[in-house]
Amino acid sequence: MTDPELQVLTRIQAIMANEEQVIGRRGVLLPLKQAIIGDGDMRVVIEIVAGDPALSAHLLWRSSCAHGSTSNSKNRSLKEALIRLGHINIYRYAFTYYLKERLDELPQPYRKLVHGYWHLTEGIARAAAEYLAQLQDCKTDADEVHTLALFSVYGQIIALTAFAHLNAESEQSYPLAVMKSLIDTQQLALSIEAFNSLNLDAQLSKEFLVAHNIEKSDDPYSPGMLLRTVLARKGLLLNPPPAR
C-alpha cells in the first residue's frame, strides 16, 4: 500500500465511524434504532415509521419487491406489514433508504460513481428475489435475503461516500485514483469496517461474510448461502472459489 493510500484509508475510516456524516435523516433513524434495541415495543416502532410517510411507502414497496407477486406479500395496512417484517428488517430497510438519500446529496463525480454501485446493488436485490422465488419449499424469509442483498457492495458505497467527505474537508484533494485502488484491493477490509463502524446488527455482518464465501454456514438455505449463489453468478464474490 502506498503512502497516499494509507493516509486516505486511515482518514476515511475515521469518517466512516461518524454516522451523522454518512447517513441522512438522523432525526428518524436514530429514534428508530433506539426503539428497536431498547424495549423493542412494536407500537413505538410503528409510530416512528408512520411519522415519515415516504419511509412508510418505501418499506411497503421494498417488502413487495422481496416477495414478488405472491399473495402472501400483500398487506392490508402499514401496521400489518411492519409486524410481518420484524424489527431487524424494518431497520435494515430504513437504513438503506436514508443512506440512499445521503448519496443523492454527494457532489460530482462521487455521486455518479456511488450511484453506479447503488444500481449494482438494486440489480443484486432483484436477482436474489427472483432466485428465491424459483426455489420450491424454501422457508427462508424473503425480506432477510432482500435486505442482505441491499448490503452486497456496502463497503464500497460507504468508503466512497467517506472519501467524498474527506476531499470536501481537505485543503488539498486526494486523486480519485487513490480511492479506486483502495476499493480494488481493500474491499473486504472496507466492508468489515463499514459494518462495525455503523453498528448494524451482527447477523447481517455474519451473513454478509457467508454470502461472499468468507465464512461457512451449515444451513444451505441461510440468507447468506442463497445470496452467495447470486453473487457467484454475477462474478461479485469477494472470495471466489479456486477455478477448477
Image (spheres, rainbow, N blue to C red):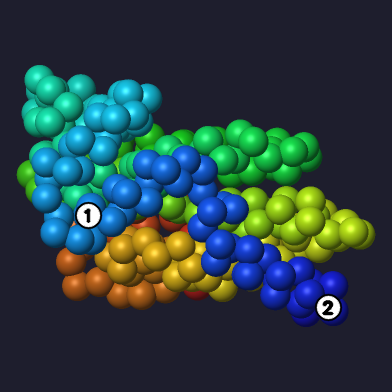
Q: Mark 1 points at which residue?
A: 36
> Which quadrant of the view contains residue 172?
bottom right
Q: Residue 2 carries which label?
A: 2
Q: Is residue 172 left or right of residue 221?
A: right
As measured in the structure, the alpha-carbon distance from the residue carrying label 2 to the one carrying label 1 is 42 Å
Residue depicted at 66% across the width and 57% down the height: 162
Residue situated furthest right in the rendering: 172
Q: Which mark is residue 113?
A: none
The number of discs equals 2
**Coordinates of residue 199 in the picture (x, y in percent):** 40, 65
- Residue 27 shows in the view: yes
Residue depicted at 20% across the width and 35% down the height: 47
Mark 2 against mark 1, which lies toward the viewer?
1
- Three-letter amino acid code at disc 2? Thr
Residue depicted at 70% across the width and 75% down the height: 10
Which is more N-terminal, label 1 or label 2? 2
